[in-house]
Amino acid sequence: MTDRLVIALAQMNQRVGDLACNAAAILEMREKAAGADLLMVPELQLTGYPPEDLVLKPEFVRRTMEAAERLIDATATPGPALLFGSIHNEDGLNYNVMILAEGGRMIARTLKRELPNYGTFDEKRVFTSGPLPEPIEFRGVKIGVPICEDIWQDVVCSHLADAGAEFLLVPNGSPYELDKDDKRALLVRSRVTMTGLPLAYLNRVGGQDELVFDGSSFIMHADGERVVQFCDWEEELLLTEWQRGPQGWLCRTRAEHQLDPFPEDVYRAMVVGLRDYVTRNGFPGVILGLSGGIDSALSAAIAVDALGADKVWCVMLPSKYTSEESLADARECAELLGCRHDVISIAPGVAAFDEALKEAFAGTTPGLAEENLQARLRMVALMALSNKFGPMLLTTGNKSEMSVGYATLYGDMSGGYNVLKDAYKTTVFALSRWRNRNKPEGALGPDGPVMPANVITKPPSAELRPDQKDEDSLPPYSDLDRILEGLIDKEMSVREVANATGEPLELVAKMEQLVLKAEYKRRQAPPGVKIGVRNFGRDRRYPISNFFHTGPEVELPR
């Protein structure tokens, strides 16, 4: 039995399904952790997280188990013992597992019991729940290893404490969302208080489709003191010294990082999500329509910070309704960012379609169809450039627009990824103001402003008809976003939202019906970074054909 352990905690990125790459990264961390007794990496680090329906593919599970055996064999070489996340199949059932290996053999394994099946999580679909886990014995020390969701319910930690665990090591795959740091800290504080045991919370970093992992790993003593705080968004390896004393085990290491506050945390989540999505899917860069408005300006800034100016191509696609102000703002924005900027007029295309549709549209009044034609022609041009030269088309719509359908299907909704998909318009304003005054760590863009101040201060407009403003069709965004947060993020009824916000009941009811009516559009939208508790996608799964609403009947424009 030892009274001292050096435990290396590796906050790592991942590549889902790339077993060889993930295994090599784990072994590289093991080499860097020389001098430690034990190295722990995050949940399912061998497969990447979340593996989703890859787990239902027998060949994937077979190869994962083979790769796990090779990792176990690799511990025969000098270095710390290895505690890593993988998949274990037994009697045809798949389990989420942490394996402890040393000296070329498996010492122990523990199976995840609590399988999350809410929001973005579908683990009950692919994994089987394990039994209540017992502590793992390592060098005479009983270590509890609850896996991620196992600490969100109290039964596993309570059982491990009753079974003699001396401290808890928790591997996680916990995605970023607003205020998640506070939620994790409160949760862990309740678990260490309940069990009387210190706890190391290890999370991963990096982007995986719509999810972004922020790291932010930490160690908390049984009295609730946070003695170690990892950085957020970056990989980090830390060797922590643990000592047994009269009151049990304590971590002697001290490390403190300041976590990003709002809105910097949201901005960095978008940068990480876009960077990993573009690079892992083999795109040489991105192309986007730069309209002179705030959404496209912010999207371009995030893209430059994530990928570099040489990998961002901005195209202004003016029509006869595009103002000189917008042309100038778009040009200045591209100049500030240092990225390529082209101007391609859609006026000839609009004229050609006006002529082609003249007979079919005869006797009708120009309206949404003609407006949407412009948005769709812009996407035809952008997709042609994307197909010809290879960059991924970056969509630039925000969550406020997506919520109420103020977006054109097969028009400005088209593309491969959308960093603003889960950001309400008020958040877009906050992010733009912040980035014009600050440059986040690791950003590849300019040190100074990334967009003209006029882009932030001028009234938003789609510029699809003369003198058009967003507020001609929608409430002011400061009011709209409060309504949408109640209806979508908090799942409140129309009356509850009206009471909470002070907005007229009829207005809230109209917004609810717009949200429900636009469901079919959102199902066809590209993926985008999740930042809130209810993103459009896996968090919120409403039927398209849906006749339930919570407010009075209101007449909507057709």
Image (tube, grey):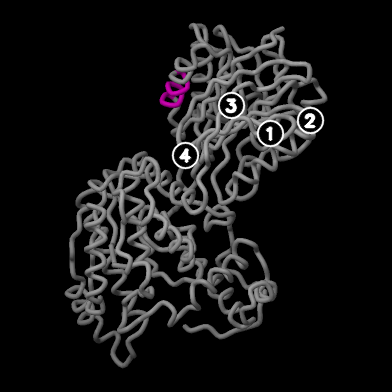
The mark found on residue 416 in the picture is none
Residue 191: x percent and y percent? Answer: 74, 35
Whichever of callouts 3 and 1 sits on the residue coming sooner in the sequence is 1
Secondary structure of residue under mark 3: loop
Instruction: Indicate the amino acid at tag 2.
Output: Thr
The magenta region covers: 20-27
The mark found on residue 233 in the picture is 4
Q: Quadrant of residue 534?
A: bottom right
The crowd level at tag 1 (other Cα within 10 Å; few <14, some 14-19, many 20+) is: few
Q: Quadrant of residue 81?
A: top right
Residue drawn at (20%, 73%) of the image:
349
Disc 4 and disc 1: Cα gap in Å?
23 Å
Instruction: Indicate the amino acid at tag 4.
Output: Trp
Instruction: Indicate the amino acid at tag 3.
Output: Arg
- Residue that mark 2 sits on: 195
The crowd level at tag 3 (other Cα within 10 Å; few <14, some 14-19, many 20+) is: few
Whichever of callouts 1 and 2 sits on the residue coming sooner in the sequence is 2
- Residue that mark 3 sits on: 254
Whichever of callouts 4 and 1 sits on the residue coming sooner in the sequence is 1
- Residue that mark 1 sits on: 225
Disc 1 and disc 2: Cα gap in Å?
15 Å
Depth check, mark 4 against mark 1: the one in front is 1
Instruction: Give above or below for 484 relative to 235.
Output: below
Q: Main secondary structure of the magenta part?
A: helix
- On screen, residue 5 versus residue 468, left or right, reads right
Whichever of callouts 3 and 2 sits on the residue coming sooner in the sequence is 2
Check if residue 280 falls in the magenta segment: no
